[in-house]
Amino acid sequence: MPTLLSVNLNKVALLRNQRDIGLPDLAAAARTVLKAGAHGVTVHPRPDERHIRFADVPMLSAIVAEHGGGAEYNIEGYPSEDWLRLVEENRAHQATLVPDPPEAHTSEEGWNLDTEADVLRPIVARLKARGIRVSLFIDPDPAAPAKAAALGADAVEIYTGDYAHGRPLDDYRATGLAAHEAGLRLNAGHDLSLTNLGAFLDAVPWTAEVSIGHAITAEALWMGWDAVVAAYTAICSGPRG
């Protein structure tokens, strides 16, 4: 099966927030990437609303729903009570739980599934009871998928930032295989780009979905959204090693 592409719109929202004129148009960006062939959109609302604003979340939910065709809405974030209500009220298909506190610059590490198990278990159960697929953000650690499965998670997302900065793929492949063997959906994200995505997917062929925001937004400045989404989906649809 091809790997699915979810476009993270945080950086489009960040640029919009630099002025009070509504440009770039976040709704237009969502419609454009979905029409171009992206499987879904991802947002990561933070308490300071430095990129995605809380008011954006229901608007984007409606756009994903109107697109149809199996398009999915993935909402990432730290599972505070406010964030959980936002996910539940806005028809997220997938909730990706990320262990970044409000002051974090970006998501740079996965959950410690030993020390945080008692916190995560009821949150996972709460979201699943509402029909929302739950993914836990993890580091490349072959022991992590089994722990995530024991907490009731449906999926894990491997943090790929270290890979983008030169970490060998061995641990990623081993973690991906462990997720596959645990019966979990495998997602990946952070600093993936046109230059490194293909090698990652070749090494970790069980990857069901990649969430890409920073690089795809930067590349779209030169290529345009239609061309850059087509380039990513071509990589995602390629043969796997």
Image (cartoon, rainbow, N blue to C red):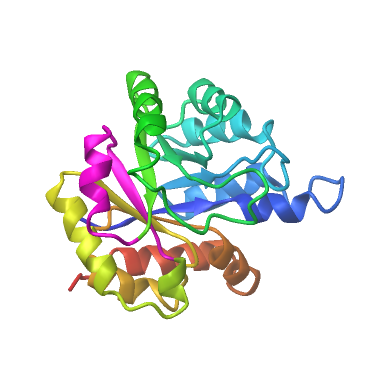
Q: Is residue 101 magenta?
A: no
The quadrant of the rendering that contains the C terminus is: bottom left
Residue at x-position 29% and y-position 36%: 153
Q: In the rendered view, does 69 fall on the left or right side of 32?
A: left
Q: Residue furthest left?
A: 181
The correct choice, above or below, for 80 with respect to 192 in the image is above
The correct choice, above or below, for 172 with respect to 145 in the image is below
Q: Position of residue 41 (x, y in %)?
A: 49, 45
**Residue 104 is at least partly visible in this image:** yes
Q: Position of residue 184 (x, y in %)?
A: 22, 44
The quadrant of the rendering that contains the N terminus is: bottom left
Q: Is residue 145 magenta?
A: yes
Residue at x-position 62% and y-position 51%: 10
Count how many numbered circles sit on residues in the image: 0
The correct choice, above or below, for 157 with respect to 197 in the image is above
Q: Residue furthest front?
A: 115
Q: Which residues are magenta?
A: 140-160
Q: In the rendered view, does 32 fall on the left or right side of 18?
A: left
Q: Nearer the viewer, residue 1 or 102?
A: 102
Q: In the rendered view, does 6 fall on the left or right side of 206?
A: right
Q: Position of residue 230 (x, y in %)?
A: 44, 65
**Residue 238 is at least partly visible in this image:** no
Q: Position of residue 103 (x, y in %)?
A: 68, 48
- Quarter of the figure with residue 49: top right
